[in-house]
Amino acid sequence: MYAEKLSHAYIVAGSSGSALEKARSLAAQMLCSASQNRPCGACRDCVKLAHGTHPDFIIIQRQTDSSGKPRREIYVEQVREIVDSAHILPNEAAKKIYAIKDADAMNVSAQNALLKLLEEPPDFVALLLLCENIDALLETVRSRCAVVRSAGPDELEPDPAAVESALRYLSAAAKGDELALLRLCNELGELTPSQASDFADTALKTVSDMLARRRDALGLNEPALLRISQLLLRAREYLKGNVGVKHVFGLLSVRTIENR
Ligand SMILES: [Zn+2]
């Protein structure tokens, strides 16, 4: 996806586990030594990365205090070590990559210390700033990084309330329970636009899990699931187009009933 042109600095936004996974996949594209179709998954670099033993993929994390708990912040000393070592050539690969976990925990002086490296990194260095809260990074840092999200809307941790509503919607659709559908859509009409989009995303994800048989389909067959997913996609489009939430769910209830 990013193979056309790789930047030297990325903010990898997402929860810590998913951001690390994304960082690894970016690193694989940068470190893979195959001549095409990178990452190949088979070369020495890809294999070492997958085993977590690649010497040119360097993970920096918060230090721990004497009781073994991670410190609240990443301090300037840690960043200075990065800056100093960044000028040393990679061990094995053509590049070396620093992945800073919880980069949003870098305090202001740490971030400032990183700036110079972000501005003029050696050709062989790439920096990945993994963080949940991009806003905790200084504007000067942010503006020098390309931002990638570690997960699309489908992969984000779903909001429990959205999951519950999605299941209520699908089960009412499965039973053809018009009254339950109207009631639910009436309630959903009161959501904020962002909650409403969460509902649509979660319901879509649930439907795709049902289609893939990762979840019980509540008696909905494949054509029915596909029709519902079309309706949800359209609802999501409307929400993106700033159509009122009430209106979108009004339509959704009517269409779901018609579609049976
Ligand atoms: Zn490879």
Image: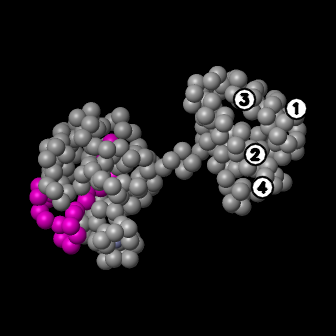
In the rendered structure, find residue 222 and report the number of the disc placed on it. Answer: 4
- The earlier-in-sequence mark between 2 and 1 is 1
Could one spot residue 72 in this view of the protein? no
Residue 111, given in percent of the width and then of the height, sits at 22, 41
Residue 202, given in percent of the width and then of the height, sits at 64, 43
- At a point 36% along the width and 38% down the height, the residue shown is 134
- Marks 2 and 1: which is nearer the front? 2
Could you tell me the amino acid type at mark 3?
Phe
Q: Which residue is mark 2?
A: 227
The stretch of residues the image draws in magenta is 84-104
Q: Pointers 4 and 2 in contact (CB under 8 A)?
A: no
Q: Is residue 103 magenta?
A: yes
Residue 73, given in percent of the width and then of the height, sits at 29, 44
- The earlier-in-sequence mark between 4 and 2 is 4
- At a point 71% along the width and 39% down the height, the residue shown is 231
Image color mode: one colour
In screen coordinates, is 7 left or right of 250? left
Could you tell me the amino acid type at mark 1?
Leu
- Marks 3 and 2: which is nearer the front? 2
Residue 218, given in percent of the width and then of the height, sits at 81, 52
Q: CA distance from mark 2 to mark 1?
A: 20 Å
Q: Pointers 4 and 1 in contact (CB under 8 A)?
A: no
